[in-house]
Image (cartoon, coloured by chain):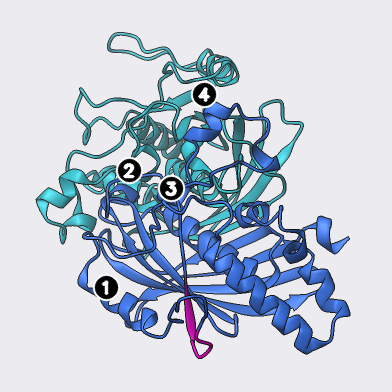
Chain colours: A cyan, B blue
């Protein structure tokens, strides 16, 4: 997952070189560039077909909790205006697709037939509501990222509960998206997950990702999976990402 | 995942109480009981239909490496004889199903319709070779467990490579199976995963699980994901399991 977004941006050198640039630029210039960069990432326009389905939008399988939380965050999102954007948004929804149109360098060894069949792990099942239903929102200042996740019946581990690997998958997906917003060309180095309380199949939970610190080429993010009202802690984790040597030297 | 096997055994009180019994029994009696217990777990006869498909057996999607390694371990497995078993085996293949026939206590809140649709996360895609193809073998002395894993094109994370969550899922699946052989009624408490080198989609890797230590109610297992010849280290992890309070007090 970590490299997915990295490779998506590989063709975009001006954006990819941003973490290095940030150390040389005046802070205000850096913020401006990063804002441009975040906007580009969040819309991801250059590798997906305009007709590609955005799986982060509501569908008929979404339960009341999922819809309610979606509305809560979506109402605080930037409204897209014709040719211009409102600046006073608190959150931004992250679109989500099940494949990229073209494989970048990571997939060149694969045959084109194989490449065309490849699907993003969390979006590999067509039936709405059967597996991972989720939507991510990134905060304006990028210190936080939230994910509303509804776990379908095909994610079973213990009877009636979500598989630990499916929880790890969502934690990886959320934290790597968050880290990618901050530094772009990153690699997942470590995931450390503490399972506190099982998640019932069919339920909706909130995954909350916060930036802990950046140190040299490292980005440390912490993540909590809770009930939608925050009263029950299901899982907590830390994720360490390293800025690729392509950038970090 | 951790609770899956636990709940499977919930109806089988004599087996479930084994970890406690072990502390009271003479070591040889404990070993004998555990052997019975491992055999019962590995065949898992009481909650699956005799007609249920065992996904750990070879299918047409398995590549040469997968088949070769399967033969390597399978040739060292116990041969099943009519009504009796040979004792001089080094490994035992672990059967794998995509659902249990009946949900135990964990799923009682689910409607029966919902329960009937639930599928085990790693076996939720029907198309052979598209997602997780794997088979597990447990060593005779239970100190080791190996898994041969072929990653299908629906597990994509970075383009051309396996999603970090899919790798975490396999690590959870392997270590929890291993821990369940050792102590049965366990809970996954922690997964700590270091990603060293990405795994190309379509490739076969070896997942090697070793018992580090048992300490009171805790079982610590370490796990490595390598190329099939062991020359490339892709991922390494530790997994901590805790014997359920139902047994451990």
Task: Give residue A120's mark.
Answer: 2
Q: Quadrant of residue B13?
A: bottom right
Residue B6 x/y as whole percent: 67, 56
Q: Residue furthest front?
A: B83
Q: Residue furthest left?
A: A112
Q: Which residue is mark 3?
A: A183
**At numbered mark 3, what does the secondary structure look like: helix, strand or loop?**
helix
Nearest the eye: B60 or B193: B60
Task: Give residue B67's mark.
Answer: 1
Residue A70 x/y as whole percent: 53, 19
**At numbered mark 1, what does the secondary structure look like: helix, strand or loop?**
helix
Distance of mark 3 from mark 2, alpha carbons?
A: 22 Å
Residue B155 visible in the displayed image:
yes
**At numbered mark 4, what does the secondary structure look like: helix, strand or loop?**
strand
Distance of mark 1 from mark 3, alpha carbons?
A: 41 Å
Q: Which residues are magenta?
A: B86-93
Above or below, B166 relative to B147: above
Q: Earlier in the sequence, mark 3 or mark 2?
A: 2
Above or below, A5 relative to A203: below
Q: Is residue A170 left or right of residue A10?
A: right
Q: Nearer the observer, disc 1 or disc 4?
A: 1
Q: Which residue is mark 4?
A: A91
Residue A157 x/y as whole percent: 56, 48
Residue A203 x/y as whole percent: 60, 29
Q: In this rendering, do the residues under marks 1 and 2 share a single chain? A: no
Distance of mark 1 from mark 2, alpha carbons?
A: 26 Å
Q: Residues within 10 Å of mark 2 (few under 14, many from 20)?
A: many
Q: Is residue A179 left or right of residue A8?
A: right
Distance of mark 1 from mark 4, alpha carbons?
A: 49 Å
């Amino acid at each position: 997952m970590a490299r997915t977004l990295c490779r998506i941006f590989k063709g975009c050198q001006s954006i990819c070189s941003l973490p290095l640039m940030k150390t040389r630029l005046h802070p205000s210039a850096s913020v401006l560039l990063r804002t441009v960069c975040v906007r580009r990432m969040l819309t991801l326009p250059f590798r997906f077909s305009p007709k590609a389905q955005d799986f982060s939008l509501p569908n008929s399988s979404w339960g009341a909790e999922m819809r309610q939380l979606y509305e809560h965050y979506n109402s605080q999102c930037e409204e897209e205006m014709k040719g211009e954007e409102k600046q006073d948004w608190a959150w931004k929804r992250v679109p989500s697709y099940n494949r990229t149109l073209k494989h970048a360098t990571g997939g060149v060894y694969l045959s084109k037939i194989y490449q065309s069949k490849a699907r993003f792990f969390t979006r590999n099942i067509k039936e709405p509501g059967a597996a991972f239903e989720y939507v991510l929102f990134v905060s304006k200042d990028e210190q936080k990222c939230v994910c509303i996740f509804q776990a379908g019946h095909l994610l079973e581990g213990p009877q009636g509960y979500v598989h630990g690997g499916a929880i790890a998958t969502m934690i990886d997906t959320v934290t790597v998206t968050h880290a990618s917003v901050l530094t772009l060309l990153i690699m997942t180095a470590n995931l450390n997950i503490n399972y506190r309380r099982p998640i019932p199949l069919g339920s909706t939970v909130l995954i909350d990702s916060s930036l802990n610190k950046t140190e040299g080429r490292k980005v440390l993010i912490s993540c909590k999976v809770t009930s939608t009202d925050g009263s029950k802690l299901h899982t907590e984790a830390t994720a360490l990402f390293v800025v690729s040597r392509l950038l970090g030297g």
